[in-house]
Image (cartoon, rainbow, N blue to C red):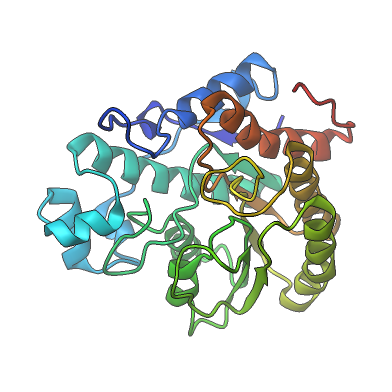
Amino acid sequence: MVPVVYHPHYVAPLPPGHRFPMLKFQLLYELLLKDQVISLDSCFTPAIASSAILQLVHTPDYVEGYCNGTLDAKAQRRIGLPWSPELVRRTCTAVGGTILTAQLALEMGLACNTAGGTHHAFPSYGSGFCIFNDLAIAVRVLQHQGLVERVLIVDLDVHQGDGTAWIFRDDPQVFTFSMHCEVNFPTRKQTSDLDIPLPEGLDDDGYLQILAQYLPDLLTQVKPDLVLYDAGVDPHIGDRLGKLALTDMGLYRRDRQVLSTCLAGGYPVACVIGGGYAEDLTALVYRHSLLHRAARDVMTGKAFKPTF
């Protein structure tokens, strides 16, 4: 089975009614086990990322301020999540999860986290529910370990990965590719190595045609040692914050297209789940599980059998 990374610390308490669907991480793990997409034998537990690891990307003042709960009120509001020691633990564990996922992908060809994709975090501040940029930190860790030279970040969350784009703006060894809804957060976009702004209301076929137009050529051009794939499900037609019109089947086809294209070329892929903000938590968790189902099916050559 595909190696999957999970930790019970992926869930931290939030105030009742908060719009961030924190419980989805635990429910995703439970659904994957129940549907036998994964097994306990294929699950890996990450370590908590240390302050030194966080500072490979983030400034010491920001890391210390967040971890100690001393950020000012404006900085906290920009993040959008109320501070707590449990949330600090959750955040640092999720970063450790993406690092482990990337390491497993290099070893086994494909690995999936059950969290991750905090691509709005900048070196000195957090934004849009993103505190530390797990994608960027994972890249820096692997670079420092001498495990990779060239990395391709494929960000298909509906929102541009602005923090990731800014962090790697002057790094020729890391190529950032973002397909996102043009009229969506963040209002001020950064410049990725390749940005594909998508029109509001784009459907499955239109989306997948655009993806197929760019991804194979990018892999040939970049020749990455690792692909980091942010598989946000907020392009779904039922997402509160999305503005695109993909269906469940469209998300599955997207994930399978990315994974099969990369693996066919011999490029290892580390996956994170990215954003998703549906009112129906059960439907949202199922959408996130499509990534892991696609990973299983690509690895085994199985056809997809929808359970919805």
Horizontal and vertical percent position of residue 272: 56, 47
* Position of 63 relative to 100 (above/below): below
Relative depth, front residue between 265 and 290: 290
Horizontal and vertical percent position of residue 104: 59, 45
Horizontal and vertical percent position of residue 49: 33, 48
The residue sitting at 85% across, 62% down in the picture is 209
The residue sitting at 77% across, 78% down in the picture is 221
Q: Is residue 140 visible?
A: yes
Q: Is residue 3 visible?
A: no
Q: Is residue 204 left or right of residue 197?
A: right
Horizontal and vertical percent position of residue 225: 67, 65
Q: Is residue 16 left or right of residue 64?
A: right
Q: Is residue 101 left or right of residue 152?
A: left
Relative depth, front residue between 236 and 265: 236
The residue sitting at 42% across, 60% down in the picture is 137
The residue sitting at 51% across, 81% down in the picture is 171
Q: How many marks?
A: 0
Q: Residue furthest top?
A: 34
Using the rendered view, name the quadrant where residue 214 is placed.
Answer: bottom right
Using the rendered view, name the quadrant where residue 156 is placed.
Answer: bottom right
The quadrant the C terminus occupies is top right
Relative depth, front residue between 263 and 218: 218
